[in-house]
Image: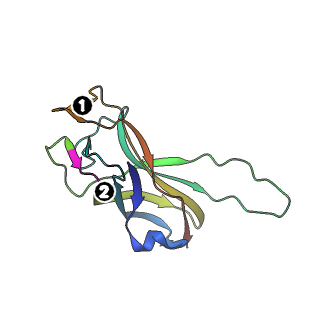
Amino acid sequence: MRCGDANPALETPTRTLGAGEQDVPVMLSFVNRGDEGAWIHNPFAAMDGAQEHIRLWYAEKPVEEPGVTPLPVEPEWVALEPPTLVQRPLLWIGPGETETRQFSAKLSLDPGRYLMRASFSSYEVDETVAGQNLLRGSAFSSEHTVEVRG
């Protein structure tokens, strides 16, 4: 299972945002490349925050200088929020299927260049639901550079 990017704006190398507080739309695709279907915790259902979460990670992009390795970044995160919460706690993704969902993140950023990526984590206790696999673990989107202009 892979947490991918379905927003054409996020597929470009750099996306531009304005500075200050805003709701940033984030479109994610959950891809099952396997030959068996599986259940995942529904990212549109309430998540407990510790064992289950969907987040947008971000950090100011270090300035690159030839011959100099930058210090590691220390990312921060905000919760990705669905447009509405649903009661259905699980989501079925069949073999070869993709589920694309839109979320939003409340961000307040100063001007600069940022690295961003989304994560989905679910560590439910049960391993199966009605004899079908319930996936546990984490998935990450690819990393994107976002330019914030003042």
Q: Nearer the viewer, residue 137 or 103?
A: 137
**Rendering coords of residue 18 (x, y %):** 48, 72
Residue type pointed to by label 1 = Thr
| Segment colored magenta | 91-95
Q: Is residue 138 left or right of residue 129?
A: right
Density class for disc 1 (Cα within 10 Å; few <14, some 14-19, many ≥20) is: few
Density class for disc 2 (Cα within 10 Å; few <14, some 14-19, many ≥20) is: few
Question: Which of pointers 2 and 1 lies earlier in the amino acid sequence?
Answer: 2
Judge whether residue 115 is colored magenta.
no
Q: Give the image quarter of residue 74.
A: top right
Q: Which residue is mark 1?
A: 128
Q: Quadrant of the C terminus?
A: bottom right
Q: Which secondary structure, mark 2?
A: loop
**Rendering coords of residue 136 (x, y %):** 35, 35
The correct choice, above or below, for 113 with respect to 44 in the image is: below
Q: Which residue sits at x=30%, y=56%?
A: 96
Q: Nearer the viewer, residue 59 or 141?
A: 141
Q: Closer to us: mark 2 or mark 1? A: 2
Q: Which residue is mark 2?
A: 96
Q: Which residue sits at x=24%, y=51%?
A: 94
Figure colour scheme:
rainbow
Residue type pointed to by label 2 = Gly
**Rendering coords of residue 47 (x, y %):** 28, 39
